[in-house]
Image (tube, rainbow, N blue to C red):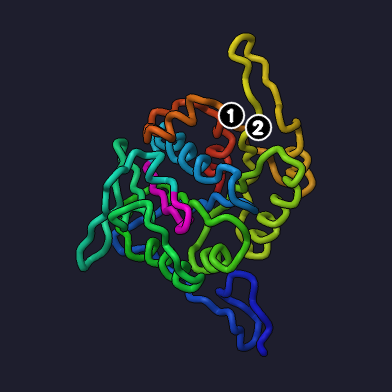
């Protein structure tokens, strides 16, 4: 059997590579400045929240943003942006993304079904092919940044996405728990094996701010993500607090009202790409 190729197959030197996967191109009606993947080594760390907050933070900086929700079996981006009962449409030329109140172009599996509670029960190959179509067939328009909310973990679907879609950078989301090193290691190693630039780490659920004195309280411990970042030679780009107001913005579909600067470090890292 041919040796398995576990990296970008473009220019691959493995003879008769059995894992050679065609690189995809966006729809002819789409022009993308930078493509940034937001990933994690496991689910439940707030990857979709970070994607949503990063999109809004970029828009607050005057950038045109699109989001490809590649977490097909657990899509939550439409909820955060207030799309309820919306079903995307298209023509023979392509699919039209949903446009948020502030103009973000968003495409998700939940925007292609009549009932968002309907589960998508597909095998990996179908899921990977579907995500590819969300990249090639959707007319996102002219955007400065395309954010891809990746499926959790390091399995077949994330691997195929990284092989098919050209990425300019990856942001890894973690939490301040004892398993953070293992979680980060999986995601970091996968990105490095795929030769994709790692921008750094974002620690979600980092602390709680006392409503009285403003002091930061670290319920899960302090500094674990920072230690992991140093171990892998990466910057810790942001520490996101546990805040009720943010939860309400997501639950009520009003995430675009977010005005914080928690992700300033991530934005700066994106801006430095290509310099």
Q: Position of residue 257 (x, y in %)?
A: 39, 28
Q: Position of residue 76 (x, y in %)?
A: 44, 47
The residue to which callout 2 is attached is 206
Kindly identify the residue that appears in the image at 64 percent across and 72 percent down.
Answer: 6
Vertical position of residue 216 compared to residue 226: above or below: above
* Image position of 39 (left or right of 81): right
Which numbered disc flags the more N-terminal residue, 2 or 1? 2
Q: Is residue 236 in view from this perspective?
A: yes
* Image position of 109 (left or right of 220): left
Whether residue 92 is in magenta: the answer is no
Kindly identify the residue that appears in the image at 53 percent across and 38 percent down.
Answer: 267
Q: Position of residue 256 (x, y in %)?
A: 38, 33
* Image position of 31 (left or right of 271): left
Helix, strand or loop under label 1: loop
Foreground residue, 193 or 248?
A: 248
Q: Quadrant of the image for the N terminus?
A: bottom right
Could you classify mark 1 by the number of other residues whose Cα lies within 10 Å: few (under 14), some (14-19), or many (20 or more)? some
Magenta-tinted stretch: 64-75
Foreground residue, 119 or 166?
A: 119
The residue to which callout 1 is attached is 242
Could you classify mark 2 by the number of other residues whose Cα lies within 10 Å: few (under 14), some (14-19), or many (20 or more)? many
Foreground residue, 189 or 60?
A: 189
Whether residue 72 is in magenta: the answer is yes
Kindly identify the residue that appears in the image at 67 percent across and 20 percent down.
Answer: 216
């Amino acid at each position: 059997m041919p040796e398995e190729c576990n990296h970008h197959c473009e220019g691959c030197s493995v003879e008769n590579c059995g894992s050679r996967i065609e690189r995809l191109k966006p729809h002819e009606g789409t022009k993308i400045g930078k493509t940034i993947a937001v990933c994690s080594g496991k689910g439940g760390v707030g990857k979709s929240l970070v994607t949503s907050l990063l999109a809004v933070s970029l828009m607050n900086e005057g950038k045109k943003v699109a989001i490809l929700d590649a977490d097909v079996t657990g899509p939550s981006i439409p909820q955060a942006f207030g799309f309820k009962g919306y079903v995307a449409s298209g023509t023979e030329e392509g699919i039209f993304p949903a446009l948020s109140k502030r103009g973000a172009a968003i495409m998700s599996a939940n925007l292609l079904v009549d009932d968002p509670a309907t589960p998508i029960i597909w095998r990996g190959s179908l899921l990977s092919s579907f995500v590819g179509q969300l990249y090639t067939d959707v007319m996102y328009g002219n955007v400065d940044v395309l954010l891809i909310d990746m499926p959790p973990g390091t399995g077949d679907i994330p691997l195929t996405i990284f092989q098919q879609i050209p990425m300019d950078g990856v942001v890894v989301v973690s939490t301040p728990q004892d398993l953070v090193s293992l979680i980060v290691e999986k995601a970091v190693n996968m990105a490095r094996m795929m030769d994709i630039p790692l921008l750094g780490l974002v620690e979600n659920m980092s602390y709680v701010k006392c409503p009285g004195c403003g002091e930061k309280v670290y319920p899960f411990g302090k500094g674990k993500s920072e230690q992991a970042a140093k171990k892998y030679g990466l910057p810790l780009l942001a520490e996101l607090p546990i805040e009720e107001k943010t939860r309400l913005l997501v639950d009520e579909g009003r995430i675009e009202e977010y005005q914080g600067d928690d992700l300033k470090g991530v934005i700066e890292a994106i801006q430095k790409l290509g310099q």
